Image (cartoon, grey):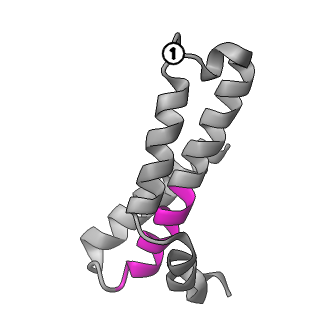
Amino acid sequence: MEIEQSRLLTLKAAHMMDTVGNKKAKAEIAMIKVVAPNTTLRVLDRAIQAFGGAGVSDDFPLASFWAASRALRLAGGIPILTYVKAAPVWR
């Protein structure tokens, strides 16, 4: 369900960027910057838990995926500032 939510929000933001422009789609872009990385981390966390101790070992790439996703989450902007940009839509 979370993956589908992220996918639909991404498609909506892309559609708005194409039809009304980036400035008018900035709230949707901000929402994607929050939702997609958080969803990625939650899915990876569940996968790591499903694999047990092997999920954090070098036998599977899950731990390195999680670390890279965490770093990319910060690269998309400081999370609290992204929430502030998306706040007008969430009110």
Residue 41 vs 33, above or below: the answer is above
Q: Quadrant of residue 46?
A: top right
Which residue is labeled 1 in the image?
58
Q: Position of residue 36 (x, y in %)?
A: 51, 53
Is residue 29 inside the magenta stretch? yes
Disc 1: CA contacts within 10 A as few (<14), some (14-19) or many (>=20)? few
Q: Position of residue 13 (x, y in %)?
A: 40, 66
Question: What residue sits 57% from the left and 76% below the top?
Answer: 80
Q: Nearer the viewer, residue 88 or 12?
A: 88
Q: Nearer the viewer, residue 27 or 72?
A: 72
Task: Write the start and end of the magenta stretch as one range.
Answer: 24-36
Residue 1 vs 26, above or below: the answer is above
Q: Quadrant of residue 18?
A: bottom left
Q: Single out the residue that lies furthest toward the front.
A: 57
Q: Secondary structure at mark 1?
A: loop
Question: What residue sits 46% from the left and 64% below the top?
Answer: 33
Q: Quadrant of residue 1?
A: top right
Q: What amino acid is at disc 1?
A: Asp
Question: What residue sits 47% from the left and 33% below the top?
Answer: 65
Q: Main secondary structure of the magenta part?
A: helix
> Which quarter of the figure is the C terminus placed in?
bottom right
- Locate residue 55 relative to residue 27 in the image: left or right: right
Q: Position of residue 21 (x, y in %)?
A: 26, 79
Residue 85 vs 74, above or below: the answer is below
